[in-house]
Image: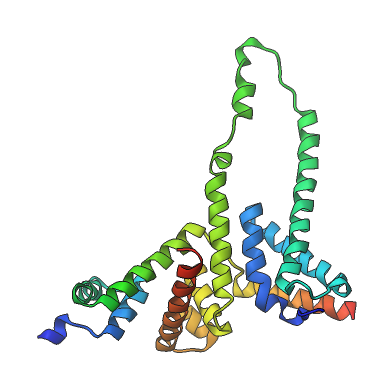
């Protein structure tokens, strides 16, 4: 029965990571919450992880897609060849 | 004495995302940002011989990029100037007051402080991302910034989902520690 409600720290961290990308289920979140009630390390990890997600969201970070980066790489390599 | 080396073969891998983020927060247009960083890399190649190695490669590229961004704004401002010369305000009484509305501060200006803070936060996040391994950084960017599906990342990088979550966990732990020191 206890296995049904209680999860290991490792599992809790994994659920917390998945939660940052909205990939955890309600049941998993519930189990994470239970773990947070008695585990300082889990609570600390959840707080820090949530802050990181908030910071990334606030910063509105952007980066090149894999395809855009490849294209830029090809152009730079061609230019480099021409320069040499 | 020069302490930094220059290696254009690594520029895309090491600096393209940082330069892209730096640019897009300043020009707000993906296509223009891509053109500007391409011009920056090309200009970097041309002036490679001027690299003294006193500053890091990234600092040197940023200084070129800043000039490119200024050039871009100079160019669009000169176009805007021409447009304004052509613009006429008529003197009809029923239009009185319109000019004031057209010249009022836009919301963007009022949010300048917020935008500046976001830019600095973005720079801090990229600085922390630089400390991740190449694989951690690639997975973290794809999952967190580009919002790719787990399956898509696994296919692209040829890794298993459990492998992906281990990498994400390590990346997030390192990022959170770094951000705590530098920002949060």
Q: Position of residue A68 (x, y in %)?
A: 65, 71
The correct choice, above or below, for B171 with respect to B113 in the image is: below
* Residue displayed at 63% across by 74% down: A67
Give the image location of residue A23, x and y in percent: 35, 73
- Res. B150 in view: no
State the residue at coordinates (77%, 34%).
Answer: B83
Location of residue A48 with respect to B100 vertically, above or below: below
Q: Is residue B55 visible?
A: yes
Where, quadrant-wise, is the N terminus of chain B in this rendering? bottom right
Question: Which residue of the protein is positioned furthest toward the top in this rendering?
Answer: B93
* Along the viewing direction, whichever of B69 and A22 lies nearer the viewer: B69
Quadrant where the image shows the C terminus of chain B: bottom left
B29, A12: nearer the viewer = A12
Residue at position x 25%, y 72% in the image:
A29
Question: Considering depth in this image, is B126 or A80 the residue closer to the camera?
Answer: B126
Q: Quadrant of residue B66?
A: bottom right
Please state if B170 lies on the left or on the right of A28 as rendered: right
| Image-quadrant location for residue B126 | bottom right
Residue B133 image position (x, y, % from top left) = 56, 84
Residue at the limit of the structure toward the left, as seen here: A1
Q: Say how the picture is coloured.
A: rainbow
- In the image, taking residue B16 as reference, residue B157 lies left or right, namely left
Where residue A2 sits in the image (x, y, percent)?
12, 85
- The number of discs equals 0
Q: Is residue A62 above or below residue B1?
A: above
Residue at position x 76%, y 68% in the image: B60
Q: Quick check: A49 left or right of B31? A: left
Residue B135 vertical position relative to residue B29 in the rendered view, above or below: below
- Residue B22 sits in quarter: bottom right
């Amino acid at each position: 029965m206890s296995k049904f409600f209680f999860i290991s720290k490792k599992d809790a961290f994994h659920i917390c990571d998945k939660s940052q990308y909205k990939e955890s289920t309600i049941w998993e979140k519930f189990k994470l919450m239970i773990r947070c009630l008695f585990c300082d390390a889990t609570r600390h990890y959840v707080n820090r992880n949530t802050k990181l997600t908030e910071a990334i969201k606030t910063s509105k970070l952007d980066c090149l897609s894999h395809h855009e980066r490849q294209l830029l790489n090809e152009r730079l390599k061609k230019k480099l060849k021409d320069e040499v | 004495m020069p302490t930094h080396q220059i290696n254009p073969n690594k520029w895309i891998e090491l600096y393209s995302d940082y330069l892209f983020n730096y640019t897009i927060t300043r020009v707000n247009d993906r296509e223009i940002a891509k053109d500007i960083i391409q011009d920056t890399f090309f200009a970097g190649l041309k002036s490679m011989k001027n690299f003294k190695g006193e500053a890091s490669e990234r600092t040197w590229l940023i200084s070129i990029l800043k000039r490119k961004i200024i050039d871009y704004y100079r160019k669009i401002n000169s176009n805007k100037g021409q447009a304004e010369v052509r613009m006429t305000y008529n003197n009809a009484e029923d239009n009185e007051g319109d000019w004031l509305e057209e010249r009022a501060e836009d919301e963007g200006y009022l949010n300048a402080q917020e935008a500046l803070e976001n830019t600095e936060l973005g720079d801090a996040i990229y600085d922390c991302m630089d400390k991740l391994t190449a694989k951690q950084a690639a997975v973290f960017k794809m999952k967190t910034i580009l919002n790719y599906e787990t399956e898509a990342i696994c296919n692209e990088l040829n890794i298993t989902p459990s492998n992906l979550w281990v990498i994400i966990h390590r990346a997030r732990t390192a990022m959170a520690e770094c951000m705590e020191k530098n920002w949060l």
